[in-house]
Image (tube, rainbow, N blue to C red):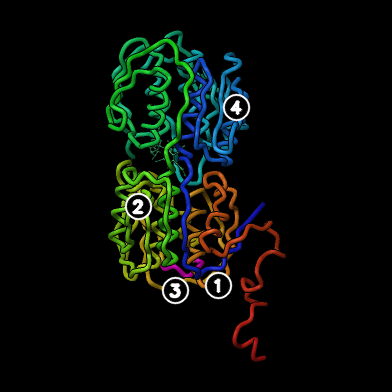
């Protein structure tokens, strides 16, 4: 297993390009299952989750090849398999995105239930309710969702839940409805940019989906989808993470390949905190975190509000803003495993229900910390970049699922971060209180 050794305190400077969006690429790759011709996808990041989806699609009869550094070609070569095995699904929840395409195109699917998750309770009842409304016969057997339908039919359905709509549930139901006889209307659909990107991909193959980018989708059923080419949208979560990296290190970074219109709430909140944004003449976004930082209240909600996937990174940033901040997560109210790890670096932060309360402005000091999930890992790296001295961030396999070459790109911006194997020998001596040089031990 690898870990990062980070020496904090370096302001980040320079230019970096944002990758294609993981959470757009995964459902779009899954939807290639439903096409009758080849798909070429551009700007697909090379991530562990993309490799897991590749492996899963291969078991489902799809030939997947990287044709260029950033492009994937996908083509169905065998349309008989319909079982998404536990062994692959347990590695990544987004595997559930094969359910809608399989059911819509092949009329049947057996998809392992994804199981537990470190960011809280993640049921798929809304996915199943939506597919049932389209006429699918669904049962749960031996840990698998078994779904069948001779022919799906259009329906009026509602995908709202207690914590908002469902992103991958909307992807599943929308893709299945493409093949339903008649018209489907989905109300309270998730309208995250990644859902819209999937809809644009499906329409590029001949689907008839209107209302993309709104919470009401209308889908006229068709029989067949052709192949197409499609460019994945830039990753708004990675962009936000890099913006916060600039701000937390009091640096100035220029980001290329950003859709600022997908990030209005995050950019406005960062401006309120004291981060300055400007457009460069070539269309990039310059982010300056060199001024004073102010405390803020942030609430993560479904799009277009602040995303839950940026909640942990904002918490990290607000440890540097003098005063009391509150960060609340209404999408995943239990997603706060990073809080106690940040406290190990000296952050005055505690969890209170669905919020983190931060008394910011205290200097942080390097420590050994453990990542619990993808965005928590990124937030801990950011906190370590702001801390004085050396830190170790363990279990970074979580981070590798969703950030491409993260440490190389941070290093190119001036960060002092390296990836090493997680062994006691690689833990910096400064993190061992018995061997670390202190004024007293030096004197003795
Ligand atoms: N929910 C239900 N029933 C369902 C589905 C969801 O109650 O059937 C609840 C969830 O428990 C949660 C809320 O609805 O409280 C939203 O969950 P959603 O289904 O939208 O999440 P998801 O589709 O499983 C995607 C992203 C997550 C991101 C969430 C929220 C992908 C592959 N994953 O998950 O991304 O946090 O939407 O925006 O798109 C990440 O990238 O780190 C990540 C976790």
Q: In whole angstroms, how far apart are the C-alphas of marks 2 and 1?
A: 37 Å
Q: Which mark is residue 64?
A: 4
Q: Which residues make up the magenta segment?
A: 344-348
**Quadrant placement of the C terminus:** bottom right
Q: Secondary structure at mark 4?
A: strand
Task: Determine the residue positioned at 41% across, 14% down.
Answer: 179
**Spot occupied by residue 318 in the image (x, y as percentages of width and height):** 37, 63
**Spot occupied by residue 315 in the image (x, y as percentages of width and height):** 40, 59
Q: In whole angstroms, how far apart are the C-alphas of marks 2 and 4?
A: 38 Å
* Sooner in the amino-acid sequence: mark 4 or mark 3: 4
Task: Determine the residue positioned at 35% across, 68% down.
Answer: 321
Residue tagged 2? 281
Disc 1: CA contacts within 10 A as few (<14), some (14-19) or many (>=20): some
Is there CB contact under 8 Å for labels 3 and 2? Answer: no
* Sooner in the amino-acid sequence: mark 4 or mark 1: 4
The residue sitting at the bottom extreme is 443
Mark 2 or mark 1, which is nearer to you? 2
Of residues 25 and 379, the one drawn nearer to the viewer in this rendering: 25
Mark 3 or mark 2, which is nearer to you? 2
Q: In whole angstroms, how far apart are the C-alphas of marks 3 and 2?
A: 36 Å
Residue tagged 1? 389
Disc 3: CA contacts within 10 A as few (<14), some (14-19) or many (>=20): some
The residue sitting at the top extreme is 150
Instruction: Evaluate whether residue 165 shows in this view.
Output: yes
Q: Is residue 205 left or right of residue 87?
A: left
Look at the magenta stretch and give its main secondary structure. loop
Number of numbered discs present? 4
Whether the magenta-drawn stretch holds residue 24 is answered as no
Q: Is residue 251 left or right of residue 368?
A: left
Residue tagged 3? 363
């Amino acid at each position: 297993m690898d870990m990062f050794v980070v020496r904090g305190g370096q302001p980040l400077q320079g230019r970096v390009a944002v990758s294609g969006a993981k959470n757009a690429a995964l459902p779009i790759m899954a939807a290639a299952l439903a096409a009758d011709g080849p798909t070429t996808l551009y700007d697909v990041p090379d991530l562990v989750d993309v490799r897991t989806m590749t492996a899963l699609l291969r078991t489902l009869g799809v030939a997947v090849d990287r044709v260029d550094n950033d492009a994937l070609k996908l083509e169905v070569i065998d349309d008989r398999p319909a079982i998404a095995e536990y062994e692959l699904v347990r590695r990544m929840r987004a595997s559930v995105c094969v359910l809608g395409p399989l059911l819509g195109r092949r009329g049947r699917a057996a998809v392992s239930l994804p199981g537990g998750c470190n960011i809280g309770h993640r049921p798929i009842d809304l996915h199943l309710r939506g597919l049932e409304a389209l006429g699918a016969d669904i049962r749960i057997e031996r840990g698998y969702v078994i779904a069948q339908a001779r022919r799906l039919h259009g329906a009026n359905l509602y995908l709202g839940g207690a914590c908002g709509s469902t992103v991958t549930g909307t992807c599943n139901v929308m893709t299945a409805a493409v093949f339903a006889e008649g018209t489907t209307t989905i109300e309270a659909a998730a309208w995250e940019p990644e859902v819209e990107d999937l809809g644009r991909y499906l329409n590029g193959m001949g689907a008839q989906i209107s209302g993309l980018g709104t919470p009401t989708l209308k889908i006229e059923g068709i029989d067949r989808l052709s192949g197409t080419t499609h460019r994945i949208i830039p990753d708004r979560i990675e962009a936000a993470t890099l913006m916060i990296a600039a701000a937390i290190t009091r640096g100035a970074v220029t980001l290329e390949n950003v859709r600022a219109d997908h990030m209005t709430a995050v950019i406005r909140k960062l401006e309120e905190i004291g981060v300055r944004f400007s457009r460069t003449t070539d269309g990039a976004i310059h982010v300056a975190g060199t001024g004073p930082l102010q405390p803020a209240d942030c609430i993560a909600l479904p799009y277009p509000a602040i995303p839950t996937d940026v909640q942990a990174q904002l918490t990290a940033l607000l440890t540097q803003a003098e005063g009391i901040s509150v960060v609340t997560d209404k999408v995943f109210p239990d997603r706060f495993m990073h809080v106690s790890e940040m406290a190990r670096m000296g952050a005055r932060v505690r969890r209170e229900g669905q919020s983190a309360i931060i008394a910011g402005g205290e200097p942080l000091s390097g420590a050994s910390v453990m990542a619990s999930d993808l965005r928590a890992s990124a937030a801990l790296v950011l906190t370590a970049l702001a801390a004085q001295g050396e830190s170790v961030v363990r279990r970074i396999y979580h981070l590798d699922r969703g950030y491409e070459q993260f440490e190389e790109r941070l290093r190119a911006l001036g960060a002092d971060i390296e990836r090493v194997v997680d062994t006691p020998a690689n833990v910096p001596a400064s993190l061992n209180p018995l061997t670390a040089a202190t004024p007293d031990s030096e004197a003795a």
